[in-house]
Amino acid sequence: MPALDDAALQGLAERIGRHLHRTRQMLVTAESCTGGWIAKTVTDVAGASDWFDCGLAAYSYEAKQALLGVRPETLESHGAVSRETVIEMVSGALVHSGATVAVAVTGIAGPGGGTVDKPVGTVWIAWKRRGGYPTAQVFRFDGDREAVRRQTVAAALRGLETVAD
């Protein structure tokens, strides 16, 4: 997936925002490797307060536990970059907010931190509607730290188009 430039990310956020506003939904983001970039992108849209509730940047294990309710056992057994963790993150974001739809991301943006099983560019993204079941997908993005993070923001926003329908 090619990285989108700022204008393309902005256009994607505007389209999502129009849909969320039209369908009276509110968004919450739970971000690790993007450090709040998804929230920044959506709040760059004028009128985002009509459809954006809050963003939680939870980088450390402790923050994931305290802010999103990720269980210590999950982090110990599966690590921060896992399907299990991102599902707990997206569910916790809905529990700890007034939003109706959530997206969560956790990954290894690099340049270090990768392993054979989880190389740099490995990112898990999950989406969930309040009262629904989460969906999660793993991505393997190429490029440097910024490229991985930019691709993560784009994929997270694109996935919202499906979950918010």
Image (cartoon, rainbow, N blue to C red):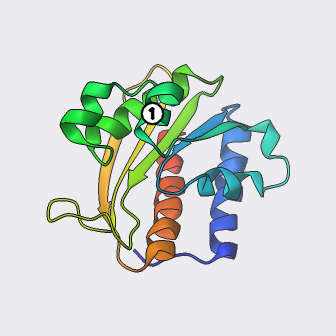
Q: Secondary structure at mark 1?
A: helix
| Foreground residue among 65 and 142 | 65
Query: For residue 51, which quarter of the picture?
Result: top right
The residue lying at 47 percent from left, 43 percent from top is 104
* Residue 165 appears in the figure: no
- 5 to 35, vertically: above or below: below
Q: Position of residue 133 (x, y in %)?
A: 37, 27
| Foreground residue among 113 and 125 | 113
State the residue position of label 1: 62
The residue lying at 61 percent from left, 52 percent from top is 36
* Residue 143 appears in the figure: yes
> In screen coordinates, is 140 left or right of 143?
left
> In screen coordinates, is 49 left or right of 26?
right
Picture mark count: 1
Q: Position of residue 126 (x, y in %)?
A: 40, 43
Name the quarter where the N terminus is drawn.
bottom left
- 135 to 110, vertically: above or below: above
Q: Position of residue 30 (x, y in %)?
A: 53, 41
| Foreground residue among 69 and 100 | 69
Q: Amino acid at mark 1?
A: Glu
